[in-house]
Image (cartoon, rainbow, N blue to C red):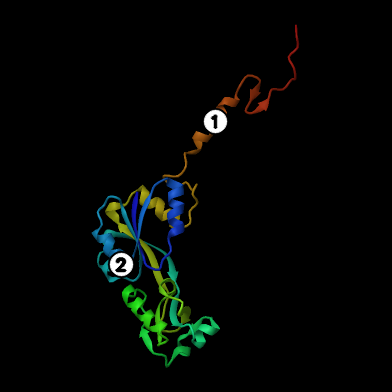
Amino acid sequence: MLSFAFVTGSAPGKWIRRYQQATGNRIEAVDSPDPWALLIDAPSSPPPVALIRLPDPRLDEASEDFHVVRLYEEAPGVAVPKDSVYAEVGEKVAERDLEGEHVNLAFSQRPDVGAVREALQVVAANVGIAYGPLPLLTHLSKKQVVPLEVTGPSVAPTPVALVWRKADDCDAIQDFVGITKGRSVRSSRTTQAAKPEKTRTKAHTGDFRKGKRANHPRKGGKRRRR
């Protein structure tokens, strides 16, 4: 079993399902606004893994003790009121088009989830806008708020990475990392995948019976009587 903490707004469900199907092992998963804090406090059994947003200065300080695998980037986003002109258009918006709007929360690649929730409540009251990683805004927004992708000099994609202690590295973690990077369930790099090929070929040994060779009939037709 693995212990897996994933940052709020991410969606690792498909990885969890594929891992459990491929290995038969269970994952103890928890949604957390700060999975790094859970990772450093977690015991080594079951092996803990965290999905976090970068950059994180706490990881920079402890980088020698942790493995880090970057997986993807989240687009920057802005949350606007449902009745705004931006929501009516419903398309990607540029920062320059938002000039003059009251900003409830400035952009950060790794925002405080609690601060984002509070800012979105203000946006829902039809007051101002709030910036953040688009998946996080989408996850937390209610019906009165519309999250849109945003471009501009003050925003940037947010890297998302898997992190685990080097001391905890094991086959179970490596299998999970492989799944997150898109490897097949039957990939030879999945250490706990289905049984090896030799187990399947063993089933063919019963076909080498009298009158057959390698699954092909013996040539020469019927045997003559003497």
For label 1, the crowd category at 10 Å Cα-Cα, with few meaning under 14, some 14 to 19 and many 20 or more, is: few
Taking the image as shown, residue 201 lies to the left or right of residue 171, namely right
Distance from label 2 to label 1 (Cα)?
50 Å
User: Is 213 drawn above or below residue 5 in the view shown?
Assistant: above
**Residue, disc 1:** 203
* Horizontal side of residue 119 vs 90, given as left or right: left
User: Is residue 52 positioned above or below 44 on the image?
Assistant: below
Percent of width and height locating residue 105: 35, 83
**Under tag 1, what secondary structure?**
helix
Which quadrant: the C terminus?
Answer: top right
Residue 154 in sight in this render: no
Q: Is residue 219 found left or right of 150 in the rendered image? A: right
Q: Is residue 1 visible?
A: yes
Amino acid type for the residue under numbered disc 1: Ala
- Compared to residue 127, the image places residue 164 above or below, namely above
Amino acid at circle 2: Asp
Q: Which mark is residue 28?
A: none
> Is mark 2 in CB contact (under 8 Å) with mark 1?
no
Q: Position of residue 49 (x, y in %)?
A: 33, 57
Few, some or many C-alpha atoms within 10 Å of disc 2 (few <14, some 14-19, many ≥20)?
Answer: some
- The answer to which image quadrant residue 112 occupies is bottom left
Front position in the image: 143 or 141: 143
Residues 147 and 47: in front is 147
Mark linked to residue 34: 2
Residue drawn at x 36%, y 81% is 119
**Residue 193 percent location from the top left of the image:** 45, 44
Q: Earlier in the sequence, mark 2 or mark 1?
A: 2
Residue found at the very far top of the displayed protein? 226
**Disc number lying in front (2 or 1):** 2
